[in-house]
Amino acid sequence: MKKYLALLIAAAMSTSILAGCGSAATSQRDSSAQVSSADSTTDVTSNSKNVKSSETIDIKIWHDGDEAIMQTIADQVNSQLSGDNITVTFEKKTDMPNQLKLYGNDPVNAPDMYFYAHDVLGSFCAMDILASLSDVTDTSALLADILPMPVEAGQYQGTQYLLPVYFESLVFIYNKDLWEGDIPSTTEELYEYMVDHTDTAAGTYALVNQHTNAYNVSPFIYGFGGYVIDKNGTPGFDDPNTIEAAEYNKKFGALEADGDYNTVTTLFNEGKAAAIIGGPWLASGIEEAGIEYGIVSLSDITLPNGNGMAPFSGVQGAGVLKTALAEKKDAIAKVLQAMASPEVGIDLANKSGCAPANNKAYEDESVSSDEMISAIQRTASTAVPMPNIPEMNAMWSPAEAMFVAINVNGVDAVQAAADAQTAALQAIADMQ
């Protein structure tokens, strides 16, 4: 059991990929915050709430993310709740999952809420420290304006534990000075363009992608109806649809650089690739390189079966600790309602380049006119939440071995899938 819990924590730390949103996040890092010297904790509160009355209820929220983003949320929530004598305080905790393991059931030291990526939700639920959102408030009203995909991401075993606030996904990013003509609307047209515009010997590419990484291959896997692992913890590498996706991805991989994240990113930023499959985390580097770029939703590029490409998505949101309900349930309910508002989403989009989970936020022109955010919103129609069960952390290595075997070493896809399935099942068994 101790080994299993240790692996849950490792999963929580290694799969939290959403440190920030788009390029706007960089410019927000000077946002004012209160920094505590104790326990490596940063307190982020509304700038207008430094002085509190004795009746004020403070909701303490642990996070391990971008402080500017937390500041934006805190300012908006505290503004909305100023008349209720409720404030939120974000405290940055290094190694937060282990901190929750130590203090999550401690009513004295535990936070009231946490803000983190959805893909570790299963690990936190296994610690038995979270309250269902339905134990706090009316979830049908709370989630009424939230996009369906982020809502699904916040569920574990059919129960809603996380309020989605913003999300990210892969998109198609292209260099307007290098790409010729329109962006293809089908993967077959994209492949034809790659054949005509790629010179691997010269090191120039039409498109680069991490074609042996499951996260970046997910648009093919889930678009074909395959899966990496299902909600019951069963790997899907040997599923016929997953194998079909892997075989189809192979021909694209042959025309893409055999590089890791840094390699493909450098190729695009140095003008040696006309397009890249990536996310908003690339924006600041692209802009620093002086590239004029455009963005297309992967859901707008269809596979041979007629489905749009379906990438993984990562969702950031807020959960509630059980220990907080006895004394702060009503206040937490109001905090959740404020966090779910379109105003929070609009501020996050404008100040940090985040794609709001609240669909009404996109009615604001400043949000809908942002090309990156708009593309991510469109991708939500086909995107799949990253599996949030603890076993997902054991899938990355078998998946990479499978795609390397197929794309690089020429191993038969059926055999490579069988090997990956065996390795994945063994990795899960080793977690017990």
Image: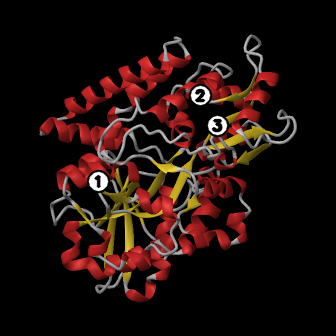
Q: Give the residue pinned by disc 2.
A: 249
Q: Secondary structure at mark 3?
A: strand
Q: Is residue 68 above or below residue 48?
A: above
Q: Give the residue pinned by disc 3.
A: 277
Q: Please report whichever mark, 2 or 3, sits nearer to the chain's N-terminal start.
A: 2
Residue at 16% from the left image edge and 60% from the top image edge:
105
Q: Position of residue 229 (x, y in %)?
A: 37, 39
Spatial CA span between label 3 and label 1: 41 Å
Q: Secondary structure at mark 2?
A: helix
Q: Give the residue pinned by disc 1.
A: 38
Q: Nearer the viewer, mark 3 or mark 1?
A: 3
Spatial CA span between label 2 and label 3: 13 Å
Which three-letter amino acid code belongs to the residue tagged 3? Ile
Q: Position of residue 279 (x, y in %)?
A: 60, 43
Is residue 41 among the parts visible in the rendering? yes
Q: Quadrant of the C terminus?
A: top left
Q: Quadrant of the N terminus?
A: top left
Is residue 49 among the parts visible in the rendering? no
Q: Which residue of the protein is positioned furthest toward the bottom in this rendering?
A: 83
* Residue nearer the viewer, 351 or 376: 376
Residue at 56% from the left image edge and 42% from the top image edge:
223
Q: Secondary structure at mark 1?
A: helix
Q: Residues within 10 Å of mark 2 (few under 14, many from 20)?
A: many
Q: Are marks 2 and 3 in contact (CB under 8 Å)?
A: no
Residue at 27% from the left image edge and 29% from the top image edge:
425
Q: Residues within 10 Å of mark 1 (few under 14, many from 20)?
A: few
User: In the drawing, does residue 173 fall left or right of residue 91?
Assistant: right
Q: Is residue 245 above or below residue 124?
A: above
